[in-house]
Image (cartoon, rainbow, N blue to C red):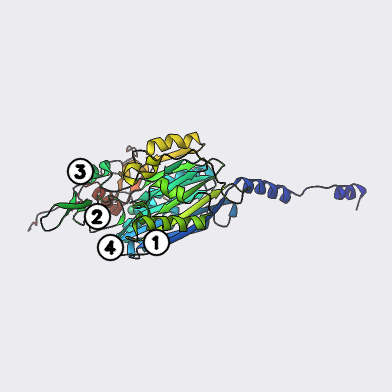
Amino acid sequence: MSNTELSRMNKPLVPLATLIGRDIGNLKIKKPFVKYGQSGLAKKGEDYFLIKTDCQRIHGDPSTQFSVFAMFDGHNGMSAAVFAKENILRNVMSAIPQGISRDEWLQALPRALVVGFVKTDIEFQKKGETSGTTATFVLIDGWTVTVASVGDSRCILDTQEGVVSLLTVDHRLEENVEERERVTASGGEVGRLNIYGANAVGPLRCWPGGLCLSRSIGDMDVGEYIVPIPHVKQVKLSNAGGRLIIASDGIWDALSSDMAAKSCRGLPAELAAKLVVKEALRSRGLKDDTTCLVVDIIPSDRPVLPTITRKKDNILTCLLFRKKSQDSSNKASKKLSAVGVVELFEEGSAMLTERLGKESPFNMNSGIFRCVVCQVDQPPGDGLAVNSGPFFPSASKSWEGPFLCTNCQKKKDAMEGKRYRIPIVDNIII
Ligand SMILES: [Zn+2]
């Protein structure tokens, strides 16, 4: 070995692997911890939840890890809730393009969530079962939280600065005028329950079926205008972190968002979830399945979310029940930006066309068309572009939207109240 080589060996060189390791280490420091707790009490046994903290955007790459928390409150049986729990994450992931960067993946999520929800609904309907479920699906990647929901299982965000904000919309016919109008326009009847000709009682429901929700997964016996298209909201938290409370209506019929957040502040997630459930039961008793997930997104240099001192709460605000919360959501949104939370995306339209965008339906590599919802390949001519009329393959045709196979096109038409009719041809005797 020459002297030069020896001296090179003696130099305290930092191996490349260590340098890369340091970089990854720095990234890790910036990524927050996710800590969670769950609690609940069953009355009918139709609440299901999903907790998965070891998901990977790129299989085998731990630096692409993200977490999923979801709540499914079933009705008319548990099978829709169980089915959604088991399939929805896979269906969302199947709609994400391969080989994209983290930024692109975060941007692709809102659309993939719409596809995943619709696909899960179509798959469940194929089973021919009649139950239905709410679905509130929360995906946490670093400081970015993306929430998709149908039904009334809320997800709220309690920021470290004490601002409580609703990340979901209640899809309840009673409280959502827009949804009521949409259901009626699509052919549904909305009214209250009438017992033996007496006065109408209870909340507004959709008939036939008598469902109080305007969106859900399943419910094939109620009508296609009860759609599985989720409201999606994506926010980026400040590096102070924040707490999410995801729960079924057993909680929200008893507690306002503010009350739930306030009842457990300063406590670790596990204890917090127990306390929210206890508080709900104390005020209303066990009238429904009651499930609560508390998820803390914590700066990695702190062991727990710090307790915050707030100005004295306005008692009126605390007394506001869910009914009023939607009206105050705009105010909450303004407050969110004031505490450093960036609102990246929000869209709640029930029209599939508006939610899927206008990307080209044509797969250049294979020369075939892939349905944007179920990812089934179909030869040209058998399906329709989502934003156009009937599709006739021609070189001059400009694409106006992603491709839907015949089945998914039928589903889309049915959701929009357009009945799909098989053309009737008179019998011709030759
Ligand atoms: Zn399809």
Q: Which mark is residue 251?
A: none
Residue 343 or residue 324, whichever sits in front: 324
> Disc 1 versus disc 4: distance between alpha carbons?
14 Å
Report the mark closest to the observer, 4 or 3.
4
Figure disc tally: 4
Label 3: which residue?
A: 185
For the residue marked with disc 4, what is the amino acid?
Asn
Label 2: which residue?
A: 211
Query: Where is residue 199 shown, x and y percent of the image?
Result: 13, 52
> Disc 4 versus disc 3: distance between alpha carbons?
25 Å
Label 4: which residue?
A: 76
For the residue marked with disc 1, what is the amino acid?
Tyr
> Disc 2 versus disc 3: distance between alpha carbons?
17 Å
Which secondary structure lies at badge 3?
helix
Q: Is mark 4 within 8 Å of ligand 1?
A: no
- 245 relative to 44 in the view: left or right: right
- 21 relative to 401 in the view: left or right: right
- 424 relative to 91 in the view: left or right: left
